[in-house]
Image (cartoon, rainbow, N blue to C red):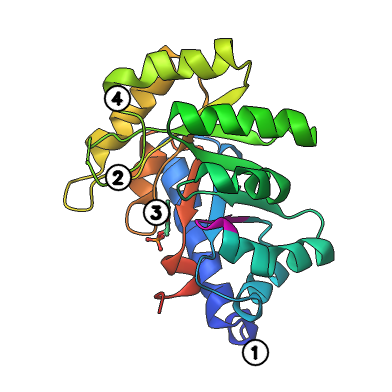
Amino acid sequence: MCEDDLMTDTEQQLLQVRQSMARAAETANRDGADITLIAVSKTFGPEEIRPVINAGQRVFGENRVQESQGKWPELKRDHPDIELHLIGPLQSNKTKDAIALFDVIHTIDRKKIADSISAEMARQNKIPRLFIQINTGEEPQKAGVAPGDADAFIGYCRKDLGMAIEGLMCIPPADQHPGPHFALLANIAERNGLSGLSMGMSADYEDAIMLGATHVRVGSAIFGTRG
Ligand SMILES: *Cc1c(COP(=O)(O)O)cnc(C)c1O
C-alpha cells in the first residue's frame, strides 16, 4: 500500500505545500529552514485543526482574537510547543487578550496599537515576537502603515517604545501582481535592518519565497476553501 493512501486530504495538502515551499527555496537558492509555514486556521474548528497538528504542523495563524480564544487555549494545552501568530488587525480593546494568547503579532499598524501592545507587554511581563504591517498598496480599506511612513514608525516602535521588531508584514492588493509589493516590503525591511518578512498566501507563497519571505501564511491550500 502506498503511503499516500493512509493520509487524509488535509495531510496531503500540507505535504504538498511543504514540498512546493522546498522547491521554491531551492530555486531561490535559499535554505528552506529559513522559511516558516504559518498554517492559517481561521474559520476552522479544533476538529479540522487537530489533523494538521497530528501531521506535525506546529505554527498556526489566526486573524481574530475572539475566535482564537474559543479554540486555541485547549489546543495549546494539549500541544505546548504550538506557536500561535496573530495575522489580523488588532483593536486596542483586544490587545490584552492578544498578548495573553499569541506568541507572535504581525499586525502592528499604528501608534495607538504600538503603545497599547507595549504597555500590555510590560503589564503581563510577556514578550511576543512583533511584526509591523505595511500597506504596500496604500489601499484605504486595508490596515498597515503607508510605505512613506514606515521608517519613522519602525523608529518609533524601536526607539520610543524599546520594542524588538522582528520584521514586516504585507497583504498585497488582490487585483495586482504581488511581486512588486513583496519587493517593496523587502526593501523597507532591508534599509531598516529587519530580517523578518511575513508575506505570501495560498496563491502566491512561492513568489514570496523567491523575493525573500521568512514567513508564509497559507490557509486554503492546507485547510480547503473557507465556508
Ligand atoms: C486568511 C489570511 C491568509 C491566508 O489566506 P489563504 O489565501 O487562504 O492562504 C493569509 N494572511 C492573512 C492576513 C489572512 O487574513
Q: Which residue is situated farthest in the front direction here?
A: 93
**Res. 47 image quadrant:** bottom right
Image coordinates of residue 41 in percent, x first then y, are: 54, 65
Q: Which of marks 4 and 2 is nearer the N terminus?
A: 2
Q: Secondary structure beneath disc 4?
A: helix
Q: Nearer the viewer, mark 4 or mark 2?
A: 2
**The label number, if any, that marks residue 1 in the structure image:** 1
Check disc 2 and report the residue beneath it: 142
Residue at image mark 3: 201
Near mark 1 (Cα within 10 A), the count class, few <14, some 14-19 or many ≥20, is: few
The residue that mark 4 highlights is: 147
Q: Residue at x 51, y 21 (%)?
A: 194
The residue drawn where x is 58% and y is 37% is 34
Residue nearest the observer in this picture, 21 or 131: 131
Report the span colored magenta.
60-65
The three-letter amino acid code for the residue at tag 4 is Pro
